Amino acid sequence: MAEPVLRAEEVSVHFGGLVAVDCVSLEVGSRELVGMIGPNGAGKTTLFHTLSGVLAPTSGRLVVAGENLTGRGAHIYARSGVARTFQTPRVFAAMSAEENVRFGLEFAGRSRTHAHDAFDNAASILGFLGLADSAGIPAGELTPAKQRLLEIGMALGARPKLLLLDEVAAGLTEGEVELAAALIRRVRDELGLAVIWIEHAVRVLMKSVERVVVLHQGRMIADGAPQDVARDPAVVEAYLGGEAGGEA
Amino acid sequence: MTMSGFRERPSRVTIAALATGVLALAVAPWVLNEFLLSLALTCLMYAGLAVSWAMFSGATNYLSLATAAFFGIGAYVTALGYESLTYPVSVFLGGLAASAFAAIVGVAILHLRGAYFAVLTFGLGELVRHAITFVEKKYSGTVGRVLTETPEAATVYLTVLVVALAAVAVCVAVRSSRFGLALAGIGADEQRAQTLGVNTRLVKIGGFALSAFFAGALGAAMAVRWTYIDPPAVFNPFIGFQTVLIAMVGGAQTVAGPLVASIVFSLLTELLRLQFPYLFLIILGTLLILLVLYLPGGIASLWTRKRAGKRDG
């Protein structure tokens, strides 16, 4: 395989005495769609924070497209091709949807080459997401579901190689979750991005991805094809033993 | 908070009105009497201070009380260079000195937010004031400096006018630039802006230093108005507070708001001071409270609100 888009080597994050992420190693190749699951408090979001440079790991190394970015700022990760969304959409409420998408294009996405014309400008990105009608509306006035889409649009504005999606389907209806899953597959299939997708709706996620990573108490307890992971005793134990109903 | 007006092109009427206004301002020294000219000078000074303050603090929501420190540093550049520098050079160097100071201090304190940032920037003025007092007493053997030959009132007025106009021009240019977009992104959600590729640290330091330039230049230009310069006079916290008040009352997310407010505020202060010498601070305070309560977006929200109403209707 060519140089992976992202390589995390034995990454750990400690908050005082608490170990939030415990020696996680992970490689993601180009055009790979990886699901990430785990009970609440497993360290998924904290791991995302380190993978996007928002939080420096306590130990370990992060290599993006062959370059060691450990300890660098989040803007360096963004410029190197890692874009992310946040669990609670963090759109710029007072700016229009179009301005929100253009923000990434003006900074991280500015000098990056892009293969697909969906990345040409803010209008084409909004069109790809089905948000063309909302372009002029202030982001704060959009429905929560549209804000979640716009959050993805902002990340796409950075013209990334790897997209980190943190529970983009949280709080959506079942139908909307299916739509979100279809959209995420299109991001990989049509735009050619690598995607790591955290989601609590495990059933939909398992159907959509070809690789699943399971975190539990900060450790990576499984990494493989969905059908294998689902049968993994450690995974079953993590979900049923500790937090029954974690699939809410 | 509103960001409307962001990246808007001024209409032809606005440009014509601006040109007329600038012309009127430029001939003021030959038209106005001494009292009115001094009042106009105060308006211009606060216009420059408030607009440049809003450029950084209004956009980023970093509430800086460092204006007094920058202003005082500029004034001291004039005082120290009094015998060796020409007036325009002093003004420029005063701006540069304040800018350099802001950049160095910014490296240390721009990771703080909210009340911590406000309190620290306020402390800066006090710190520099005491540092200069100490150095002057210890090494220069003086507590203040006398400026005997100062430029004419018209020269001072026109210099302050140029600096204030430059501040407005730079603010307008910044708002329609990528730099301005980055500042606005920092104000809206700093971490989100960083994950979209903005070097937030560098942008904040740059914005802080750019805004400090104008405060420093205005301090250097205004210094000659006092014939005797000592730290308590030029590092006056009132100047910093007044600047913040004007920008906020006007609407710190806009350029026009602080401009209008600086005129209203300076005239109002003067009127109240003359008419009600004992009650003027009480009346001013009450007015401020009412404004903050009933017009939280500032004076600028009056016309943005009107425009929004038109769009809906």
Image (cartoon, rainbow, N blue to C red):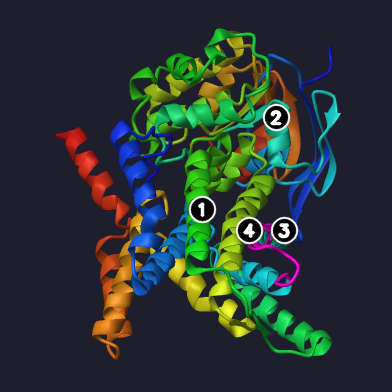
Q: Secondary structure at mark 1?
A: helix
Q: Are marks 3 and 1 on the same chain?
A: yes
- Compare residues B41 and A160 and report the one nearer the observer: B41
Q: Secondary structure at mark 4?
A: helix
Tag on residue B100?
3
Query: Mark 4 and mark 1: span between their CA atoms?
Result: 11 Å
For the N terminus of chain A, give its image quadrant.
top right
Is residue B83 within the magenta segment? yes
Query: Mark 2 and mark 4: span between their CA atoms?
Result: 42 Å
User: Residue B89: where, in percent of width, then height?
Assistant: 68, 58
Residue at label 2?
A79
Q: Are marks 3 and 2 on the same chain?
A: no
Q: Amino acid at mark 1?
A: Val
Residue at label 1?
B162
Q: Earlier in the sequence, mark 3 or mark 1?
A: 3
Query: Measured along the vertical axis of the image, is residue A45 above or below residue A124?
Result: below
Crowding near pointer 2: few (<14 within 10 Å), some, many (20+)? many
Q: Are marks 2 and 4 in contact (CB under 8 Å)?
A: no
User: Would residue A233 appear left or right of B165 to someone viewing this image?
Assistant: right
Q: Amino acid at mark 2?
A: Arg
Residue at label 4?
B88
User: Would residue B142 appear left or right of B122 to someone viewing this image?
Assistant: right
Is residue B39 within the magenta segment? no
Q: Are marks 3 and 4 in contact (CB under 8 Å)?
A: no
Span colored in magenta: B81-96
- Is label 2 or label 1 in front? 1
